[in-house]
Image (cartoon, grey):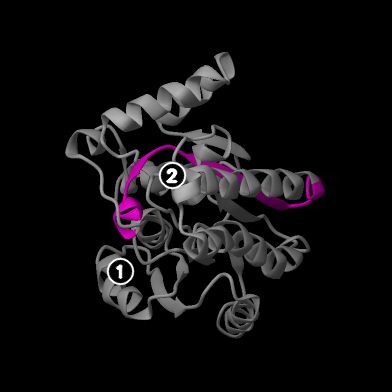
Amino acid sequence: MSNQKQKKRKKSYFAGECAIVTGASSGIGKEISRILVRDFGMMVFGVSRNLEKLERIKAEIESENPFGGSFVPYALDVTDIESIFDLRSHINTHCLNLRLVISNAGQMLPITEFSRENEVQEKGMTNTNLIGAMNMARVFIPDLRHSPVKVGFVFVGSIAGIVPVPGCAAYSASKAGVKNFAESVIAENKKRKLYIGHMMPGMTNTNLFAKSGQDLPDWVRKYMTSASKMAEMIVNKARKRKKRCVLGADAKIMRMCYRLNPSGFPRLMRRVLEKAGIYH
């Protein structure tokens, strides 16, 4: 373990304690779980619908574990608030020091015009992205806000929540909902020990597109941030208790261009997506 990582662990308010990470079976959520276990010695309740996959990655996540952390697979659907209350009861039974909740679960649909999107899939995605985040906040923030020690709740949104993306109308809307919900909750808890963060990643090289039934060309993936790097940025911002973070060079460029030309930049994005062969 490097001296730098040891210093980060010492400065962290959540090291050695308990965390919840939703969407933990793959992508950013899996990598966040790995970092929290490996670098901070946390007991991480990894949440996903797919228990089999969570159990498969448990050994992988715990393979490099100098501080005695652990990964606890826990299957639930974030759109089902009763199952989240069950998780809360489980946490209270097995862990006395919940310090960090990272609401990361998300879905995406194939990039296409809104009129061509599947209505059933669209509602499922919106429920996972927005209602799922609200459910996690509704169950855990009331406990966290009364904590006598520093604690944190992190929403993982998307740059699409502040920059509209053609071909991703419903996805952009769901992430804009997360953005405004997070901002409201941040304002409501300003003077408490509870830290609330909103992370807005740019394009990240995960299986999010593949799970939607649409993969990306290799030349596009080359410019995306790796899941491990994005997870590292999210954990670092949470450790420093940063409230609003646009993450990734592409996300920062998108935000700047949209501010400069809010009507023209989305049209430019559409042409780029068409040229890439991923907008239909």
Residue drawn at the location 50% of the way across and 37% of the way down = 159
Q: Is residue 186 left or right of residue 269?
A: right
**Is 230 or 60 nearer to us in this picture?**
230
Q: Report helix, strand or loop for mark 2.
A: helix
Using the image, tell me which numbered label, if any, was put on residue 7: 2
Could you tell me if residue 249 is visible in this image? no
Q: Quick one: quadrant of the C terminus?
A: top left
Q: What residue span does the magenta drawing correspond to? A: 188-211
In the image, residue 78 lies at what x, y percent? 56, 70
Q: Is residue 189 above or below residue 62?
A: above
- Amino acid type indicated by mark 1: Glu
- Amino acid type indicated by mark 2: Lys
In the image, residue 193 lies at what x, y percent? 74, 52
Residue drawn at the location 41% of the way across and 77% of the way down = 73
Residue, far left = 218
Residue drawn at the location 38% of the way across and 76% of the way down = 50
Tag 1 residue: 62
